[in-house]
Structure formats: C-alpha cells, structure tokens
Image: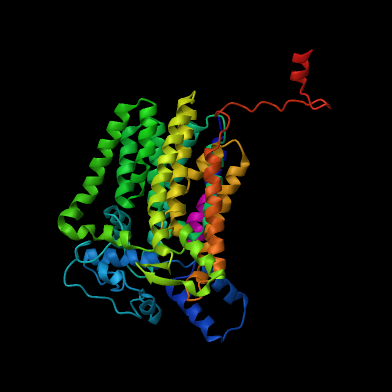
Amino acid sequence: MPDPRRVWLGWVPWCVVVFGLFNTCAGHREAEDLGRLHDSGQRSLTPWLALRVVRAAGTDDGDINRYRAYANAVLGRPYQGYYVRPLALWSGDARSEYDAKDVSDPLVTPPVQPHAPLTPYRDFLVEYPPGFFLMALPPAWVGGDFTLYPLIFSLYMGLLLTAAVFAGTRLLPLISPTQETAGALTRWAAAAALALGIIAVRRYDAAVALSLCVLAWGVVGKRPLWAGVALGLGTAAKGLPIFLVPVLLTYWLSRRRFKEAALAAATASAVGLLVALPFVLTAGRSFFDAVSYHAQRPLQIESTEGALLIVARLIAPGSVTVTHTFGSANVIAAWETPLRYLASVLPSFAVIAVCLWTRRRLRAATSESEAGLLLVRALCATLVALMTLGKVFSPQYVTWLLPLAVAVSLADDGRETRWLMLAAFALTQLVYPWCYWLGLDSSLHPLFGVAVLLRNGVLIAWAWRLLRPRRRAGVPRSPPTKQTPSGISTIEKALVS
C-alpha cells in the first residue's frame, strides 16, 4: 500500500509547473513591446530586461485570442475581425495582413461591433468541432477581457490536465498492478509537462488528453458508460478520438465484451449528437465547410512530409517555399501534392496495422492487466501514427499523450521508454517555440526540418518500443544464465552430462 503522503507530495511539482510556472509569463502587450524594443536595436542588457525576456518567451496566446474572438462573436460582444471570417478568406495567405499590425490587440486593431450574436459555422468558419465551445465559452463568461481571458483559459486547461493526470492514476494500477505508484505518475507527469512547455495549457487540447485518459480507464476498468461519455465528448471537441474506434473495437471483440462495446457506442453517439446537433441545425450546410477546410489544407511545416521537403532545400533552395494559409505555416513545393496524398492514406494503414498487432497480442494475454496494457500501448501507438504520418502536426497535439504516455511508460519494463517519452516532449518545445521562427520566414531554414524530423523520429521510436515483444506484465525477468568459459551455459552442460 503506497504511503498517502508520498502520493499527495507527487502533486506538488505538478501544481508548481502547471498552475505556477506556466502562468507567470508576460502579457500580450508586454511581449509585443519587447519585440518592438528588440527590432529597434536600442536596448542594453540588464537583469530586469533579461527577466522580462524570459517571461515574454512564455507568451503564447495567438490561438487563445482566436478562441476569445469566436466566443465573443457567439455572445454578441465586440470581437477581433481577423479571426472571424469565412472559408474563402482563410484559404488565402494572410501573413502580410498579420504582420502589418497586431490583429489581436483591440487597442491596435479596433474590434468589430456586432448588431447581434453570430451563428458559428454559418456566419463564420470554425475549424474546430462543436465541442470546442465547451472550452472557449466558459472563460468568456467569467471574464472576456483581452488580458483576463488568457489567464482564465490557461487555468481552465490546467484543471482539465490535472483531471487527466488523476484519471491516469486510476488507470495505472489496472495496467501495471506490480509496477509504479500514483505518486510516481504525478512526478513524471510534471516532468513531461515541463518538457512540453507552456503550450500544454495554451490550447484546448488538454480536453482531448482528459477524454483519452478517461476513455482508456473506462474501457480497461469495464466502465462502458464512462468510456462512451469520454469518447463522445472527445470526438465532439477535436474529432481525433473517432480514429481510435477500430483499436477499441478490436479490444472489445477479442475479449468478447460485446455488451460493453454496444453500451459505449450508444453512449458516445448520444453524447456526440447532443453536443453537435444544435450547431448542425442552426448552421445548415455551412456546418460542413470545416470539412472542406481541413481537406484543402497543404502540408504543415511540422509534418514529417513537410519537414522532408524543408530539408530538401539543402539541395534545391528555391524548390520549397512557405505559405501562411488556413491559419498555419505550410510548405509549397512541386512534390507537395503527392506527399499530401501519401499523408492522407498512411495514417489509415497505420491504424490497420496497429489493430492487427492488437488482435494478435491479445490472443496471448493471460490476465486482464496484461490485456489492458496492450490496449493502452495500441492507443498511444495509434496517436503517434496520426501525428507523425498525417499532413498536419501542430505542437499542441503532443498534449494528447499527456498523461496517457506517462502511464504506459511507467508500466513498461525499462526506463528507456520513459526517457524516450521525455525526449519527444522536450524536442517538441525545441521545435515550438524556440526554433519555430526558422520555419516562418521566406528563408525556411533546413535546420528547422532537421529538428522536426528528429522530434518525429523520437516519437516513432517511442511508439515502436511500446509495440515490441516483451515479457508479460507483472512477471519478473528471469536472471541471466551464467556462462562457462567455453561459452556453454551451465544448464546446457548439465543436460549434456
């Protein structure tokens, strides 16, 4: 029985990182002032300036300002017009407009004064599924101010991530009853969050992390209602969990849990319809513009295929350029179209391969904990495949793995898995924000492509390690057989004699 005091102490570093460190960054205007000071060249390095620079380095509210604009438009409040636009305007290159002035600050760019609340998906494009508004609207109700909204949103996401870690502590004993404790999971989760950086609470992907942890806990723990609610809410919020359904069905059918699968599917469908149907009815056919939006997107610079094209600039510097369409930085090249097609089909093949692996390995599972661990490994491997093989890989996607990746890494029988996980998280922070500027300007430096390929390669190595053959969960390794000087084991010598 783990010491309760050690379990609670494990939460201290988590709270310090997520609720303390991540919310001490500079505000938007302070960060913009420091940027203008840097551009002017009229500066002298002082300890106070160095502290301000460090605080400004953690300012990451671009997407939060987008969330705030959407929420204010829906509530009928003044909103920043740059973010609230139809599909046709999002498909054009908007970098020149963005660079001309600060489109987020209402003191620089006057907000639009609506006559009435706008209808999302009909009056303006929302590239996120309807469940997104469950994360964007509550902070606006509490405080929709330009400076207050990012802080409230960050604390909100911190709470969701904390709930995800708590769900992970409930999942860990089910998949690894003889391994690490809940206290170890919270400490490693704090390290993973610190390695990933402030983006963990500056995007609404924390909600996806929570849904995935509750989903895994509900499936392994035979709680199909919880699994269905998590699957429905996660799909309504991001759409991603729907791609995990083949793996989940493989697990349920292999374990002959037909009633659980049916109950979870019915619950997920009901929850998803409850969230999405009001938006579909009010928006009509315009609701499906979001599908066209994602179908038309080119290769994003952090995708594996996009990074390969960026590295190709070492050979042909003029063959690859960057464009700022669809709200992201994307790669344009002669080979972009076939690679984009490849990025569209590879994730599907990867999901099929993981399902076949899961079915084969579940046949040999001798306990519920071993089967549960196989499922969580398969879910993590599927997530990595969707990230690294698809055409879009935004840095916040790695938040999906927090803390599910921590739980499965702790349940692994080797520390190498844990360090690979931390390395992938840290390399994500290296790519964004520290090296991201290398991929934004017209030079599109090949070093950025190298950094992205390194991060994606480490993620793939971590997932591959999860899928490799290993000993059964809870069964200790056999000690190495002692060898005689002649190279024949003692057992073989005894058999011969």
Q: Which residue is located at x 75 percent, y 19 percent?
A: 492
Q: Does the magenta stretch include residue 131?
A: no
Q: Is residue 476 visible?
A: yes
- Name the quarter where the C terminus is drawn: top right
**Which residue is more in the foreground, 138 or 109?**
109
Q: In this view, does 237 lie to the left or right of 300?
A: left
Q: Which residue is located at x 53 percent, y 81 percent?
A: 38
Colouring: rainbow
Q: In the rendered image of this protein, does residue 183 appear above or below residue 202? A: above
Q: Quadrant of residue 494?
A: top right
**Which residue is more in the foreground, 269 or 341?**
341
Q: In this view, does 408 lie to the left or right of 273?
A: right
Q: Is residue 194 visible?
A: no
Name the spot of residue 417 as percent of width and height, x first: 58, 43
Q: In the rendered image of this protein, does residue 176 appear above or below residue 279? A: above
Which range is magenta? 13-24
